[in-house]
Amino acid sequence: MRKPRHLSSEERALWDRVAERATPLDPKRKTRAPELAPKPKPKPDDIREPVPDFRVGQKTNAARPHDIMRPLVERLAASPVNMDNKSFGKMKRGKLKPEGRIDLHGMTMAQAHPALVSFILGSQLQGRRLVLVITGKGKDRDDGGPIPTRHGVLRHQVPQWLALPPLSQAILQVTPAHIRHGGHGAYYVYLKRNR
């Protein structure tokens, strides 16, 4: 059901002029003029906190987060569970043994992407369900410049590759591996059944 549309101030003025000239059909009945459009309430996005005063020479808060995206581990943890909850719990605790693994250590992005695509699609064709993709935790390469550099290029790139075609059609779930299988330097990839 649509919300009723209210008159603007110009429409209200026009209505008042028309209503002055009109003769009512029933003189006992009082006519009620349409109401003016209410002022729109500010959206939560429009309400901003005031900018704190800043003086030249004042130190900044270095602990303030500078990245608008949540950390990768939080994003993967917040993603919905697309597989059986019991199997997912076993996988997160490291109780399921991966049926295959690929180690991307030392590869460039240009080398790692085709290797990953070939491994995932080949594993699905072989009927594997759980595979381990090892990316490594990455080296700290931040040179202190104005734009921060991510810690571990492949570690951040692999989940994005897994979420895009042609791999997305083969994957049911991606989650960081248990510490016994590499911790945050590896990912469990649960594959769909090959049909």
Image (tube, rainbow, N blue to C red):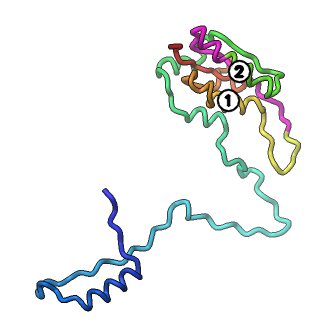
- Where in the figure is residue 141, as x and y percent of width and height? 86, 36
Q: Nearer the viewer, residue 104 or 7?
A: 7
In the displayed structure, does residue 2 sit left or right of residue 44? Answer: left
Q: What residue range appears in magenta?
A: 120-141
Report the residue at 61% width, 64% height from top.
Answer: 49
Displayed quadrant of residue 166:
top right
How many residues crowd around disc 1 within 10 Å: few (fewer than 14), some, or many (20 or more)?
some
**Residue matched to label 2:** 116
The residue type indicated by label 2 comes to: Leu
Residue located at (88% from left, 42% from top):
143
Residue 135 within the magenta-colored segment of the rendering: yes
Of callouts 1 and 2, the N-terminal one: 2
Residue 132 sits above or below residue 147 on the image:
above
> Does the rendering let one see residue 56?
yes
Report the front residue among 57 and 166. Answer: 166
Q: Which residue is outermost to the bottom?
A: 21
In this picture, residue 2 sits left or right of residue 94:
left
104 sits left or right of 130 in the view = right
Q: Do the residues labelled 1 and 2 touch (CB within 8 Å)?
A: yes
**Percent position of residue 81, x then y:** 50, 28
Q: What residue type is labelled 1?
A: Trp
Does residue 180 appear in this view?
no
Residue 164, placed above or below residue 64: above
Q: How crowded is mark 2: few (under 14 residues within 10 Å), some or many (20 or more)?
A: some
- Tag of residue 161: 1
How far across and down, in percent of the image, does residue 27 sit?
Answer: 12, 88
CA–CA distance in space, label 1 to label 2: 9 Å
Q: Where is residue 20 in the image (x, y as percent from the top left)?
A: 26, 91
Within the magenta stretch, is there residue 129? yes
Please count the marks in the image.
2
Task: Say which element carries label 2.
Answer: helix
